């Protein structure tokens, strides 16, 4: 692919991811479980990993975390740190599983990404407030990560079939 | 969805479910010995024996951003007031079982119920 074309595509993906991330901040959640999220922006990260690779995936998800925090005014706040740790860990883990464990489809990879995001956030909370107690909260987060990972995985699968056609 | 995807789903579900059940079981073992422990910025600032007391008890805790108010009633604990932006700690409502916790991340305050009181100091002086 031509260099400029790739640049344009990636910029567009950053925009889409930022919009999705911002929309997600405004969504109300019915259950009083702190930390659960639909992970809409993860759809974009997943697509980039499948269409391009790790370097581009990391770049897009990091830029998205920064832009969303600028828009929401949470730059360098705790929720920013949580998003950052979750985004980095999930991008890395999704890429590694996609590349080295061939048995999973894009849906499996999406679920793995959701779980990695949760684990990254819990690790960050433990680091930030120095309490190991939060780790007991992880099973609940992981269970809620399964349906959200499934949903984003199916959306990504659907989008990917279109994007592969246009390429 | 491949076979491996389904297996992954089922395995994670079972593991998380059992981990959750084990945590509940472990902490419910000695329910009557519940202690409310309040940590602010990594240090224990208050701990109180959790009893089935109808009287409302209110604690004021100094967090990183400001003052938090914790309410204890009928053997349950909740966050009543906090000046953090998202108020997730307040929305979480009551907790009553050992192993449960309320975390206010912006204030770096953790309220949790424990049944293991070995590492607690005898008194806190300030």
Image (cartoon, coloured by chain):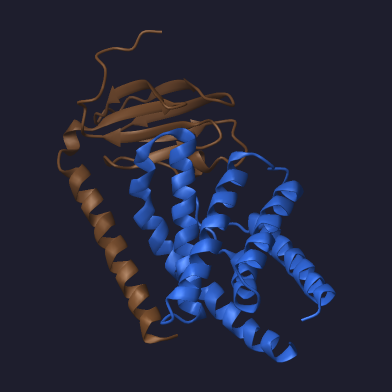
Chain colours: A blue, B brown
Q: Nearer the viewer, residue B80 or B20?
A: B20
| Vertical side of A59 occupied by A69: above or below | above
| Vertical side of B101 occupied by A63: above or below | below
Q: Which residue is farthest bottom?
A: A165
Asked whether, in this view, residue A56 is left or right of residue B102, the answer is right
Q: Which residue is farthest top?
A: B126
Give x and y (percent) for residue A71. 76, 50
> Residue, x 39% and y 33% (percent of image)?
B111
**Residue A152 showing in the rendered view:** yes
Give x and y (percent) for residue A94. 51, 68
Give x and y (percent) for residue A140. 37, 56
Q: Quadrant of residue A51?
A: bottom right
Q: Nearer the viewer, residue A75 or A48?
A: A48
| Vertical side of B46 occupied by B124: above or below | above
> Residue, x 72% and y 60% (percent of image)?
A18
| Vertical side of A145 occupied by A84: above or below | above
């Amino acid at each position: 692919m031509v260099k400029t074309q790739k640049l344009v595509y990636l910029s567009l993906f950053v925009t889409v991811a930022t919009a999705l991330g911002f929309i997600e901040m405004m969504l109300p959640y019915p259950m009083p479980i702190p930390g659960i999220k639909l992970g809409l922006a993860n759809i974009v990260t997943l697509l980039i990993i499948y269409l391009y690779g790790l370097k581009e995936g990391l770049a897009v998800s990091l830029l998205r975390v920064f832009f969303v925090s600028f828009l929401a005014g949470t730059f360098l706040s705790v929720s920013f740190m949580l998003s950052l740790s979750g985004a980095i860990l999930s991008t890395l883990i999704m890429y590694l599983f996609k590349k080295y464990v061939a048995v999973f489809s894009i849906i499996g990879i999406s679920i793995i990404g959701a779980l990695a995001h949760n684990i990254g956030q819990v690790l960050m909370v433990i680091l930030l407030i120095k309490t190991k107690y939060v780790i007991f909260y992880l099973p609940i987060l992981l269970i809620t990560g399964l349906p959200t990972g499934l949903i984003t995985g199916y959306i990504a699968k659907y989008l990917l079939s279109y994007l592969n056609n246009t390429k | 969805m491949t076979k491996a995807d389904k297996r992954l789903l089922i395995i994670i579900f079972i593991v998380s479910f059992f981990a959750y059940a084990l945590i509940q079981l472990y902490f419910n073992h000695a329910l009557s010995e519940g202690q409310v422990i309040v940590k602010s910025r990594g240090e224990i600032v208050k701990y109180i024996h959790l009893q089935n007391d109808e009287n409302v008890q209110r604690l004021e805790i100094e967090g990183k951003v400001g003052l938090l108010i914790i309410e204890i009633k009928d053997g349950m604990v909740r966050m009543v007031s906090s000046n953090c932006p998202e108020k997730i700690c307040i929305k979480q409502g009551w907790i009553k079982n050992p192993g449960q916790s309320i975390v206010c991340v912006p204030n770096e305050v953790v309220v949790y119920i424990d049944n293991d009181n070995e590492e607690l100091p005898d008194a806190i002086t300030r």
